Amino acid sequence: MTTNAPKTLKFMILGAVAATLLSGCNTDSADDGSGNGPSDAPSSASASPGGQDPAYTAITTVEQDGGQVVGIDRVDEGDKGYNVEVLDGDVIYEVDVDSTGQNPQQRTKTDFEPSDLKLLQQATVPLADAMKTAQEAEPNKNIDEANIEGEGGTVTWEIGLDVDQGQGGSDVQVDARSGKVVK
């Protein structure tokens, strides 16, 4: 009696490989910035077309030049983009980007309060993670603004959300150390 086990096994392996290739599975963990690979920015939980709030693109765009984004504010008049604050060393710069979160303008040094720098040093949760948490708490809303706050020994990211350019707004506070919603 002959067995077809080796042929069967070969076809099963071939089938698994083909299914993986056809599914478009990408095991590369690097983000090439093309939007086709993994990213730290959430891919959903927003009201934006395509499921990606342009605020996350703004963060990725600005951080490519170095530093860590520590504040963002969407310009509500018209479709003018975002003002993004980035901490580079112990200096805070402002960078303007367009409404898609791209095309950064020149960095401008800001007059940031030393007390805010101390708050930022205490934060262990990145701003983008806090924004994602806020959008999970308030689904179908976009990021309007986000900044660091400190009251009563608690350091929080205050995330302003809205449905459409200032309409239907709400604020969510996310603990900057634990990442949990506090208000």
Image (cartoon, rainbow, N blue to C red):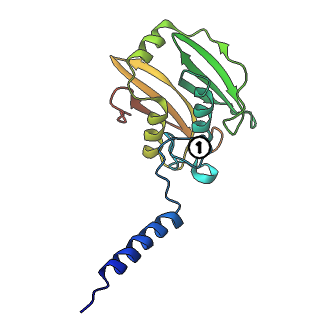
Compared with residue 110, is residue 149 higher up or lower down, i.e. above or below? Answer: below
Query: Which residue sits at x=58%, y=27%?
Result: 63
Please state which of residues 140 and 121 is positioned toward the viewer in this rendering: 121
Query: Which residue sits at x=32%, y=85%?
Result: 4
Q: Is residue 39 visible?
A: yes
Please state which of residues 11 and 84 is positioned toward the viewer in this rendering: 11
- Judge left or right: residue 125 versus residue 87: left
Judging by the rendered image, the residue that carries numbered circle 1 is 53
Query: Which residue sits at x=60%, y=37%?
Result: 55
Query: Which residue sits at x=42%, y=69%?
Result: 16
Residue that lies at the very extreme toward the bottom in this rendered image: 1
Q: Quadrant of the C terminus?
A: top left
Residue 138: percent from the left, percent from the top?
Answer: 47, 45
Q: Is residue 169 visible?
A: no
Residue that lies at the very extreme toward the front in this rendered image: 1
Residue 113: percent from the left, percent from the top?
Answer: 52, 8
Compared with residue 50, is residue 61 higher up or lower down, i.e. above or below? Answer: above
- In which quadrant of the rendered view does residue 32 lie? top right
- Judge left or right: residue 155 versus residue 89: left
Residue 15: percent from the left, percent from the top?
Answer: 44, 73
